[in-house]
Image (cartoon, rainbow, N blue to C red):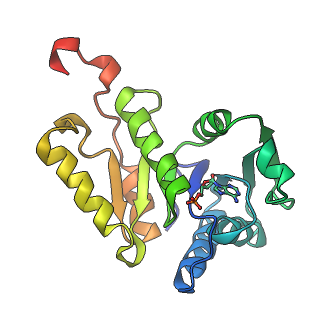
């Protein structure tokens, strides 16, 4: 299947290498598949863990990979020198703004705290109306089942408004996720709401 809609996707995933080899295999396959579909990868510019696997999966398949990394991480020598482009920024805030500016959608793979920070910022900025790109979560191997239960709880209790319940697009394969993301219709954002309706 070819998903023509996306030029570049920001891919968020772990910088660690889990013992279970399926996670690294998944990340590499995601990079390869995006490259084969002509979709560029924008990511955190690291060479370790799933991040490196996505990047090298895409690069080895001839794809475009843009890394955005803060100077402090370059100094730690965790940057991937093989990226098509490596943008070195000063702060994590500039980095996350760049992920949003350079991509037309977000895909989150399994990862840890840094990955979740990036995922929730993408969801939060979609609610607010700072971007209109689809936010996808690849729930491979049921890794995010607990998070999805909590996401449901936030809506059930009323901390996530009905208009924003479907921002997070969840699928368990990349193919179905890209299809669902391509069909995403921007929602009513907080900046479009009246203060009394919040
Ligand atoms: P984590 O899920 O905690 O491993 O964090 C991964 C996310 O945070 C990535 O998407 C990166 O943007 C950022 N990050 C954390 N650690 C690194 C690293 N060693 N190299 C590059 N980026 C990192």
Q: Position of residue 150 (x, y in %)?
A: 25, 56
Count of marks overlaid on the render: 0
Question: What residue is at 49 percent from the left and 48 percent from the top?
Answer: 117
Against 72, residue 35 (above or below) is below
Which of the 4 image quadrants contains residue 59?
bottom right
Residue 132 vs residue 127, the one in the foreground: 127
Residue 122 vs residue 4, the one in the foreground: 122
Question: What residue is at 12 percent from the left and 47 percent from the top?
Answer: 156
Which of the 4 image quadrants contains residue 137?
bottom left
Question: What residue is at 62 percent from the left and 42 percent from the top?
Answer: 99
Q: Position of residue 110 (x, y in %)?
A: 49, 67
Residue 154 vs residue 165, the one in the foreground: 154
Question: What residue is at 43 percent from the left and 33 percent from the top?
Answer: 125
- Figure quarter occupied by ligand 1: bottom right
Against 193, residue 176 (above or below) is below
**Where does the C terminus fall, quadrant-wise?**
top left
């Amino acid at each position: 299947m070819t998903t023509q809609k996306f030029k570049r996707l920001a891919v968020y995933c772990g910088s660690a290498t889990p013992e279970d080899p399926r996670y690294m295999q998944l990340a590499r396959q995601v990079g390869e598949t995006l490259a084969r579909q002509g979709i560029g990868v924008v990511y955190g510019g690291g060479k370790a863990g799933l991040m490196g696997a996505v990047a090298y999966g895409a690069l080895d398949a001839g794809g475009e990979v843009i890394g955005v990394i803060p100077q402090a991480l370059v100094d730690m020598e965790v940057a991937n020198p093989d990226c098509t482009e490596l943008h070195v920024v000063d702060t994590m805030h500039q980095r996350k703004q760049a992920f949003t500016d350079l991509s037309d959608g977000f895909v989150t793979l399994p990862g840890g705290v840094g990955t979740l920070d990036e995922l929730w910022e993408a969801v939060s900025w979609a609610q607010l109306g700072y971007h209109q790109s689809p936010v996808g979560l690849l729930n491979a191997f049921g890794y995010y089942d607990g998070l999805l239960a909590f996401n449901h709880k936030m809506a059930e209790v009323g901390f996530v408004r009905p208009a924003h319940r479907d921002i997070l697009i969840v699928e368990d394969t990349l193919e179905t996720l890209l299809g669902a993301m391509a069909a995403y219709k921007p929602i009513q954002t907080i900046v479009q709401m009246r203060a009394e309706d919040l």
